[in-house]
Image: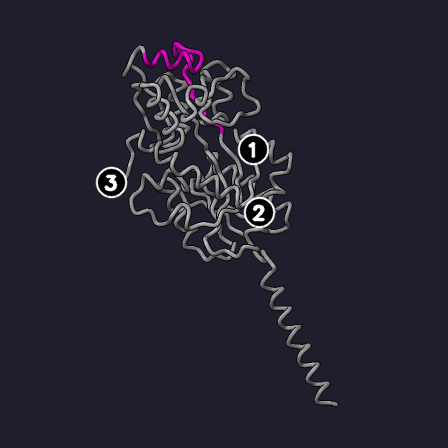
């Protein structure tokens, strides 16, 4: 009788240990989650990531912290996360560059844009716009195209850098419309905006948020929007690049991705926290002030969004003559 009793107690003890171990494995997160941003502090990507991390921390009670690893168009950060332990504690704040454009620009990329990651969710899209100095002789996208066609080689445009969404957006428009306009790359959007306002360059492709005060003061003009998505807060009669040709529209997106092999329950947990954060009207308003339009996508939908964009970016890089050798 005692032997049977001891055996039953022993079995119950083992089951309890097993259940405790299983519960420990399923408890996530148990510590801070690091969101690796592929660009320097202070820019639109970094600001968006920090606003999101703050909201996710507030909603979940866990710590989400931001770490910047700039360089090589975001490839250094993406490679770092791809090599990180797939436990859900190190995730990438990915962009159209890290998981799209860079695949066709940089030879020997230290990761695969698709195979190296498990998407968590889409965060937001940046409003990319064509801007002009107040002296430029056109006030709409259609008129700007006609002006550029009439004087091939006369005008130039600035962008934050070579290979950015902004650069590729203008090159796609130029290819479709047969425009001859010189690209002037800058080290960031700030210096380009300074030169645009000063009249040192007649055109620029950049973000709407930093341009807004100069548009309001009349120092620069908003000519068109490079995204396909219609954005709140913009003039209703503004022309989009996709109005000229559907193939011209770009998506300057941002989203969260974990290393491939991260447990699915961790991906799901992160996705739920992200969803709750993006449902916050406070966060949505703050992102809109940064020129971002937020949208939640499930891991599956976000994965399709990335995959579906690869051929588009390949064509865009080709249009800009930036293909890797």
- Is 324 situated above or below 141? below
Most foreground residue, 290 or 88: 88
Callout 2: SS: helix
Seen at 57% across and 56% down, the residue is 31
Write down the quadrant of residue 282 in the picture.
top right
Q: Which region is colored magenta?
A: 127-149
| Mark sitting earlier along the chain (3/1) | 1
Q: Residue 325 bears which disc, if any?
A: 3
Q: Quadrant of the N terminus?
A: bottom right
* Residue 101 on image: x %, y %: 37, 37
Residue at the farthest left position? 325
- Give the class, few, some or many, for how many residues have Cα within 10 Å of label 3's Cα (few <14, many ≥20): few
Most foreground residue, 292 or 174: 174
Most foreground residue, 62 or 92: 92
Q: Residue 190 bears which disc, if any?
A: none
Question: Is residue 257 rendered magenta in the image?
Answer: no
Callout 1: SS: helix
Residue matched to label 2: 271
| Contact between labelled residues 3 and 2, with CB atoms less than 8 Å apart | no
Residue matched to label 1: 287
């Amino acid at each position: 009788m005692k032997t049977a009793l001891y055996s039953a107690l022993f079995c119950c003890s083992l089951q309890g240990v097993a259940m405790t171990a299983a519960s420990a494995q399923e408890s996530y997160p148990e510590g801070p989650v690091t969101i690796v941003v592929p660009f320097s502090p202070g820019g639109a990507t970094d600001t968006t990531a920090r606003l999101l991390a703050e909201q996710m921390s507030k909603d979940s009670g866990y710590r989400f912290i931001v770490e910047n690893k700039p360089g090589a168009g975001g490839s250094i950060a993406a490679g770092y996360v791809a090599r990180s332990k797939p436990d859900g504690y190190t995730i990438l704040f990915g962009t159209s560059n890290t998981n799209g454009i860079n695949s066709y620009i940089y030879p020997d990329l230290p990761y695969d844009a698709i195979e190296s990651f498990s998407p968590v969710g889409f965060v937001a899209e940046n409003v990319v716009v064509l801007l002009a100095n107040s002296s430029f002789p056109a006030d709409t996208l259609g008129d700007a195209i006609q002006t550029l066609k009439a004087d091939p080689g006369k005008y130039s445009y600035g962008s934050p850098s070579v290979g950015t969404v902004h650069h590729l957006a203008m090159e796609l428009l130029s290819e479709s419309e047969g425009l001859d306009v010189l690209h002037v790359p800058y080290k960031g959007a700030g210096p380009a905006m300074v030169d645009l306002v000063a009249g040192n360059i007649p055109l620029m492709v950049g973000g709407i948020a930093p341009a807004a005060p100069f548009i309001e003061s009349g120092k620069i003009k908003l000519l068109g929007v490079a995204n396909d998505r219609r954005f709140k807060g913009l003039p209703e009669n503004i022309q989009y690049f996709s109005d000229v040709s559907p193939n011209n529209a770009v998506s300057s997106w941002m989203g969260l991705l974990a290393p491939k092999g991260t447990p699915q329950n961790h991906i799901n947990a992160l996705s739920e926290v992200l969803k709750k954060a993006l449902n916050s009207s406070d966060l949505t308003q703050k992102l809109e002030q940064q020129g971002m339009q937020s949208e939640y996508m499930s891991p599956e939908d976000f994965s399709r969004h990335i995959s579906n964009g690869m051929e588009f970016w390949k064509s865009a890089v080709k249009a800009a003559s930036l293909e890797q050798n």
